[in-house]
């Protein structure tokens, strides 16, 4: 057994298939593969005593945005410290590929805070760089529709001509053939919001031909949630697509909380009709995205770089402030929290609501957008705790942090607490709801692997990747909050990626 690297003993195995826990041992080969997962009579290699704790497959974050941050911080501390070994990246329509002369400069400005030259062009060249940087966790990036559309037509509001639509389909097909697991859309954002249902259907047909998944940030998660979901499922049926992922499934805003029953019924109906609809969710009731999503009217059709340029004009600043005051109630600003920004004077205020930072939150918002629309992110209150619990109980719901891989310090910006706590909080919440350990682990390992076609991970099975987490289910606790968002979770004893221990508590 010269190829044996680790002999992990004295553990409860939860295999990721819904079963367990059972007593057992695990053997890990020198090349990072699982040699045995069960009783073992071999004693060689480095012996690790699991102290009677639970050994599970590496957790899979099915909705992340670490596409560039993990290159700047390859250790991915925020992920591995909560047991995440794989992330599905490229979500909400924003991926790091394909890059052309039409979108490269824009994306370089968007990701400027990471100081990473965008030197690649395709899925394969991007993935090669991730390997060269030895990034952990392992990123599996979807092809983002916003990046894809911009690669052929830029960020302007327009209907694609036939040649542009065909080029977009060819670029998508190339990414899928190189290994991308599917396509993501962010139909709330520029330029994805300009796409017609017909444009999306044609891309879905490419996915269907390759047997890949469609993941979508719906055009609306609030006032038009049901209409957006209905349109998505209509497009899916017309395209003959079989796998759909609804990103960060929610009912945003108290006026929309009652819509959950209908939305779940629509999903269940589609599942009964042969479409594998799954959802992801972060177990928090404050969302986070670019502050620019608050913009009204024609401002909402501008990308972040165009917003910054337009707001160099003082008259435009005053006009935007007027429009925001008209379109948003005074109490709205009490629910908007600054999470991160590149504006130096406001960095110490991150984690506070806009009304706590300035007497005039509207002018504060305008100033932040003028100086750093691309890098300023805010959290928004407006989700129901009861609905969150009901969504987490859905057997097809998986953990998705909607966060970046970040270091322990704030050198790459501050995070929403979900970036450091989602996976642990997800497991803890399920266990508190009396979901069995086997089922809870399956939802964070085996189910994500099945959903995204990852055949080499997600289970404790011979010859799969040795992505492992030793955890104490009695001690699981996410400790990050908005005041200290980079606080690692408790209960994760160590995390192993491909046979290498990358985190110890």
Image (tube, rainbow, N blue to C red):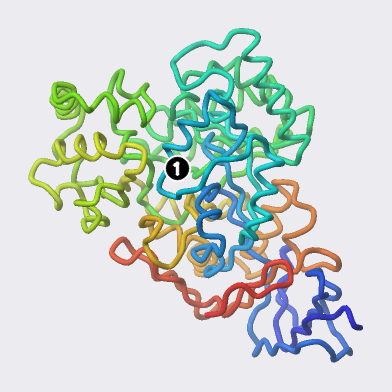
Quadrant that contains the N terminus: bottom right
Relative to 231, residue 362 above or below: below
Q: Nearer the viewer, residue 396 or 426?
A: 426
Quarter where residue 322 is shown: top left
The furthest residue to the right: 1
Report the residue at 59% width, 40% height from top.
119
Is residue 362 shown left or right of residue 416?
Answer: left
Is residue 232 shown left or right of residue 222?
Answer: right
User: How busy is the neighbourhood of tag 1: few (under 14 within 10 Å), some, or many (20 plus)?
Assistant: some
**Image location of residue 443, percent across then percent down:** 63, 58
Report the residue at 61% width, 36% height from top.
97
Number of marks: 1
Report the residue at 55% width, 30% height from top.
147
Badge 1 is on which residue?
111
Q: Nearer the viewer, residue 378 or 227?
A: 378
Is residue 30 shown left or right of residue 458?
Answer: right
Report the residue at 30% width, 39% height from top.
372
**Image location of residue 132, percent across then percent down:** 67, 55
Q: Nearer the viewer, residue 423 or 162?
A: 162
**Image location of residue 208, percent across then percent down:** 75, 28
Relative to 20, residue 182 above or below: above
**Image location of residue 134, percent across then percent down:** 65, 60
Secondary structure under tag 1 reads: loop
Quarter where residue 174 is shown: top right
The furthest residue to the left: 359
């Amino acid at each position: 057994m010269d190829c044996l690297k680790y002999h992990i003993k004295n553990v409860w195995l939860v295999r990721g298939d819904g079963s367990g826990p059972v007593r057992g041992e695990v053997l890990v080969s020198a090349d990072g593969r699982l040699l045995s997962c069960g009783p073992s009579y071999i004693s060689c290699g480095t012996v690790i005593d699991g102290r009677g704790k639970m050994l599970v497959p590496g957790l899979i974050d099915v909705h992340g945005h670490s596409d560039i941050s993990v290159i700047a911080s390859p250790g991915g501390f925020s992920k591995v410290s909560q047991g995440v070994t794989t992330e599905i990246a490229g979500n909400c329509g924003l991926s790091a590929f394909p890059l052309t002369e039409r979108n490269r400069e824009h994306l370089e400005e968007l990701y400027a805070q990471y100081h990473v030259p965008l030197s690649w062009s395709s899925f394969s060249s991007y993935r090669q760089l991730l390997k060269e940087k030895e990034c952990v966790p392992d990123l599996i990036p979807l092809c983002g529709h916003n990046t894809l559309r911009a690669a052929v037509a830029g960020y302007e509001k327009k209907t694609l001509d036939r040649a542009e639509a065909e080029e977009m389909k060819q670029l998508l097909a190339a990414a899928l053939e190189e290994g991308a697991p599917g396509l993501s859309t962010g139909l709330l954002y520029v330029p994805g919001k300009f796409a017609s249902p017909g444009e999306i259907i044609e891309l879905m047909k490419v996915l269907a031909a390759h047997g890949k998944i469609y993941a979508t940030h719906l055009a609306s998660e609030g006032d038009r949630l049901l209409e957006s979901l209905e349109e998505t499922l209509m497009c899916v049926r017309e395209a003959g697509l079989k796998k759909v992922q609804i990103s960060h499934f929610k009912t945003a805003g108290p006026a929309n909380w009652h819509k959950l029953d209908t939305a779940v019924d629509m999903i269940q109906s589609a599942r009964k009709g042969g479409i594998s609809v799954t959802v992801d969710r972060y177990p928090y009731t404050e969302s986070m995205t670019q502050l620019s999503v608050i913009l009204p009217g024609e401002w909402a059709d501008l990308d972040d770089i165009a917003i910054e340029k337009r707001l160099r004009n003082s008259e435009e600043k005053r006009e935007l402030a007027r429009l925001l005051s008209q379109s948003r109630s005074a109490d709205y600003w009490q629910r908007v929290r600054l999470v991160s920004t590149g504006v130096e004077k406001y960095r110490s205020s991150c984690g506070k609501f806009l009304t706590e930072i300035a007497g005039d939150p509207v002018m504060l918002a305008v100033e932040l957008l003028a100086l750093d629309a691309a890098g300023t992110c805010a959290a928004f209150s407006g989700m129901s705790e009861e609905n969150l619990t009901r969504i987490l109980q859905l057997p097809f719901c998986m953990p998705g942090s909607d966060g970046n891989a970040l270091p322990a310090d704030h050198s790459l910006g501050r995070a929403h607490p979900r970036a450091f706590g989602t996976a642990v909080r997800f497991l803890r919440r399920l266990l508190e709801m009396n979901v069995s350990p086997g089922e809870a682990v399956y939802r964070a390992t085996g189910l994500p692997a099945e959903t995204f076609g990852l055949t080499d991970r997600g289970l404790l099975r011979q010859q799969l990747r040795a992505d492992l987490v030793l955890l104490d289910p009695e001690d699981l606790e996410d400790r990050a909050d908005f005041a200290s968002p980079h606080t690692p979770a408790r209960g994760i004893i160590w995390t192993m990626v491909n046979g290498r221990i990358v985190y110890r508590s």
